Image (spheres, rainbow, N blue to C red):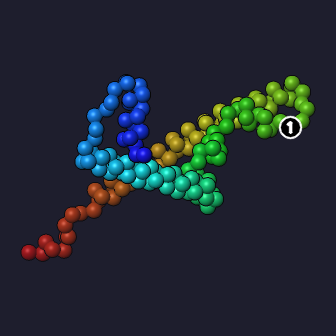
Amino acid sequence: MGIYEKLAKMTKKFDGSEPAPLSAEDKIKGRKAAKQAKREEKRDKKEVKNLAAKSMDVSNWTNAVLSGADARFSGRVEENVDDKLAAATVGLVTYDQLKAQKELLVNGKEIAAEEAKRKAEEKEVTDRKAKKQKAAKSKATLSFDQEDDDE
């Protein structure tokens, strides 16, 4: 019993009326559509299997982790003061020791920021000096040869 016959029986059950008989052409179209749907379903299942096999492959997972594509395994770029304080203090410490350690870390961060600013300013000054020297050198260089003026 085909799909259309089952459909006809179900329609008859619910409607109580007899459905119109299908022509041979309609039956052929229906069979072709059913075959096409089965082919697509098989293709989709095959794609899912391939994707599952690929995702379960150890070498692909390892390559993804090593290349850094997986953000779950990447480290933090910048630690805040509390993280540094937790790493610096180990074991039981008094409140005064903790406070002193935190102060050192905060001051160290400020000092590092000041030092970076100072280095940037020094680099800017040296760049300006180099630019001035290059400009002076290009001004001093003549664009024509003096020995060619012997006419």
Q: Position of residue 31 (x, y in %)?
A: 34, 49
Residue 109 falls left or right of residue 54: right
**Where in the figure is residue 32, as x and y percent of width and height?**
32, 51
Q: Residue furthest left?
A: 151
- Please name whichever residue, 26 or 42, is drawn nearer the observer in this view of the structure: 26
Residue occupying image coordinates x 77% and y 30%: 102
The reply to whether residue 23 is visible in this rendering is yes
Q: Is residue 148 left or right of residue 130?
A: left
Assign a secondary structure to mark 1.
loop
Which residue is at the front of the view, 132 or 69?
A: 69
Compare residues 123 and 4 and report the one nearer the observer: 4
- Residue 26: give x, y in percent of width and height: 27, 44
Residue occupying the point 63% across, 44% down: 72
Q: Quadrant of residue 133?
A: bottom left
Identify the residue at image location x=31%, y=32%. 19
Q: Position of residue 104 (x, y in %)?
A: 76, 33
Asked if residue 20 is positioned above or below residue 57 in the image, the reply reads above
**Where does label 1 land, which residue?**
90
In the picture, the quarter occupied by the C terminus is: bottom left
Say what amino acid the circle numbered 1 marks. Val
